[in-house]
Amino acid sequence: MRKVIIVDDEEAGRILIKEYLDEYPDLVLLGEANNGVDAVKIINEFKPDIVFLDVQMPGMNGFDVLTHLEELPQIIFSTAFDKYALKAFDVHAVDYLLKPYTKDRFRTAIERLSNNLIDNKARPLTESLLMDKTKFPERILVQSQNKLITVATQDVLRVEAYGDYSKLVTKDKTFVSNYGISTLEKKLNNSIFIRVHRSSIINLNKVKELNKYTKSYDVTMENGDVVRVSRGYLENIKKLMF
């Protein structure tokens, strides 16, 4: 028996997959989600063997979902867009179902699950998936009051250590992420987000001023926040200099 979760923002897409799955008694549906945020929660909770995953969804796309998973199940993408096919196989997807697809095409995808060399059990999410520049998340999960929402990484001015968690500061709001600052340093695009202090990461695109003193530097962000640069990270700050 293999456990399955379906993620698709369109109800018709989820219904079709469930209908086709009826022919495979060894594939047991655990649940479904219609957006990326809920997908992350349900996949991390139930640890399925297989996920049918849409790409374009509100809030967080399918590739961003993968970067938030604790373990990586076998992935079959199901989408109406063919432009993501190469990227899908970069993340070791089993198959790429291009909507609309037939029952025979679905059957081929199921056969590839059985023939795939990847173990059917969920495998640890590899560091390369987190570090590959093509897979830096465009959005990241944060806490907002009593719910999880997504924030566009391009809107984050800076990241601040907050115990075992982190604060993500945007132009007018501050959010808490369940990730520690060292984990976020790995997740975020390191050509844009640089560590300047043990407790601080800044977005180079959001820097207003670099201030040089006799023996130190600090950085003024677009919102007026001043971030100190510690001596151990001076090499990183040279990315701001010509």
Image (cartoon, grey):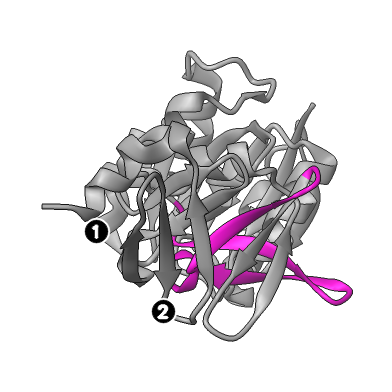
Q: Main secondary structure of the magenta part?
A: strand
Residue 136 in the image, given as x and y percentages of width and height: 41, 48
Q: Write the residue at 71% across / 49% down.
A: 5
Viewer-nearest residue: 62 or 130: 130
> Would you say residue 89 is visible in this rendering?
no
For image coordinates 66% across by 67% down, the residue present is 15
Q: Quadrant of the N terminus?
A: top right
Q: Amino acid under label 1? A: Lys
Circle 2 is placed at which residue position? 222
Q: Which residues make up the magenta segment? A: 137-164
Report the residue that reaches farthest toward the left.
242
Residue 240 horizontal side relative to residue 147, left or right? left
Is residue 141 one of those drawn in magenta? yes
Which type of secondary structure does the marked residue at label 2 adopt?
loop
Judge whether residue 34 can be spotted in this image.
yes
Residue topped by disc 1: 83
Residue 234, quarter of picture:
top left
Q: Amino acid at mark 2?
A: Glu
Residue 42 higher or lower than 232, as above or below: below
